[in-house]
Image (cartoon, rainbow, N blue to C red):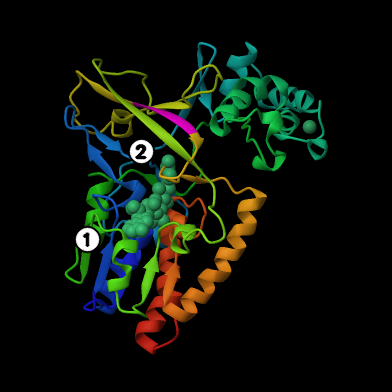
Amino acid sequence: YADYDLVIVGSGFFGLTIAERVASELDKRVLVLERRSHLGGNAYSEREPETGIEVHRYGAHLFHTSNARVWEYCNRFTAFTGYQHRVFAKVADQVYAFPMNLALINQFFGRSYSPSEARALIAEQAGEIDTKDAKNLEEKGISLVGRPLYEAFVKGYTAKQWQTDPTQLDASIISRLPVRYTFDNRYFNDTFEGLPVDGYTAWLERMADHPNIEVRTEVDYFDVRDQIPTGTPTVYTGPLDAYFGNSEGALSWRTLDFEQEIVDTPDFQGAPVINYNDEDVPFTRILEFRHFHPERAYSTDKTVIVREFSRFAEPGDEPYYPVNTPDDRAKLLRYRELARKETANANVLFGGRLGTYQYLDMHMAIGSALSMFDNRIAPYFTDGRALA
Ligand code: FAD
Ligand code: NA
């Protein structure tokens, strides 16, 4: 472990962006340690062997950004398809175009509304409760979109996501519920969007493909930490609380369970993602992976679907979404102070979604790694500045 200029813990987009920049821009030797059996973090995907269909192992990953620098950087390692994400919502035996938009309103209320008629209808229904008086998530939802849309599209889905009745959830969990008074149901509003032409794993592997970068999988940093010379510059992208042995208490996360099924049909649902908003259906959505790549010549006799279930993470589960209760936020402040000292005393920087306890989209993880490289790591190696 003495042969490396920099150690990176975790091979997700954050860690690999740092590794790539340090290896190619600074010509320094980088060791990436990865606990899992593969690189790539949660963006990892693989071909399901029976069908050849690319499956995103840790949930559907859609790439989108309005950051031109991040887009240009990503395009060095992969080309993107013209994929545009759209989501549908199944409620009581109907499928609606989502997010809530004019098509959904017309279908749900059973007649055609012009944009201004629909706006007036929803404003009237939302008038039942003033948003500033909402005492819980349910009241907040009703105050924003009215009771009928709330009960059909928000209530059951939210209850399943949080395993909690929305009347028991904090109103602050939702700040807005977008309703579009047009027929536009494109999910993202970003300037750039697409999926990597030959898959996420090919993209991630190209980032790591440099003679100065060594990736070791199936190595847990905490098992080898005492073999790494003290003071070796380190970028840690694992869970923040785990780094400090949970000294301030465990930060809470939601996790997902995925149930994959290969179905003998050319097309199961006609779309990549259908949400199941009804509370009596136990899963929150079904992903059908062939539809992410309509341009590929996948065989048509079978399809791969994944049912997604949401719950609170327990020790040992994959942490996916920060819960971020007031208690978590208090712990986070204490961990941030410990992290600041660790950077100053031991040259360890903390980054990525786990290392900062923040939900980060891929473009945000990459953008934040590029900033860490520019502001902390490059000055350290080129000008001898402190990492802290
Ligand atoms: P990660 O990808 O989580 O990488 C961290 C790595 O560190 C992991 O590989 C982990 O195994 C490793 N590690 C942790 N502890 C140790 C240790 N002690 N020793 C060694 N290795 C360790 N983003 C989008 O832009 N679009 C999407 O549609 C999208 N969908 C998502 C869906 C889900 C369910 C989730 C959870 C995330 C989604 N994201 C999406 C976010 C995307 O996954 C993240 O932006 C990206 O993973 C961030 O990369 P990262 O490097 O910070 O973390
Ligand atoms: Na209101």
User: Compared to 325, does 77 lie above or below?
Assistant: below
Quarter containing ligand 2?
top right
Tell me the residue at 17%/32% (across/down): 49
Q: Which mark is residue 276?
A: none
Horizontal side of 373 relative to 151 (left or right) equals left
The prevailing secondary structure element of the residues shown in magenta is strand
Q: Earlier in the sequence, mark 2 or mark 1?
A: 2
Query: Would you say the beta carbon of the disc 2 residue lies within 8 angstroms of ligand 1?
Result: no
Tell me the residue at 81%/40% (across/down): 132
**Residue 123 forms part of the magenta stretch:** no
User: Compared to 260, does 265 lie above or below?
Assistant: above
Mark 2 lies on residue: 83
Q: Quadrant of residue 26?
A: bottom left
Tell me the residue at 81%/29% (across/down): 129
Mark 1 lies on residue: 216
Residue 270: image location, x then y, percent: 36, 20
Horizontal side of 218 relative to 175 (left or right) equals left
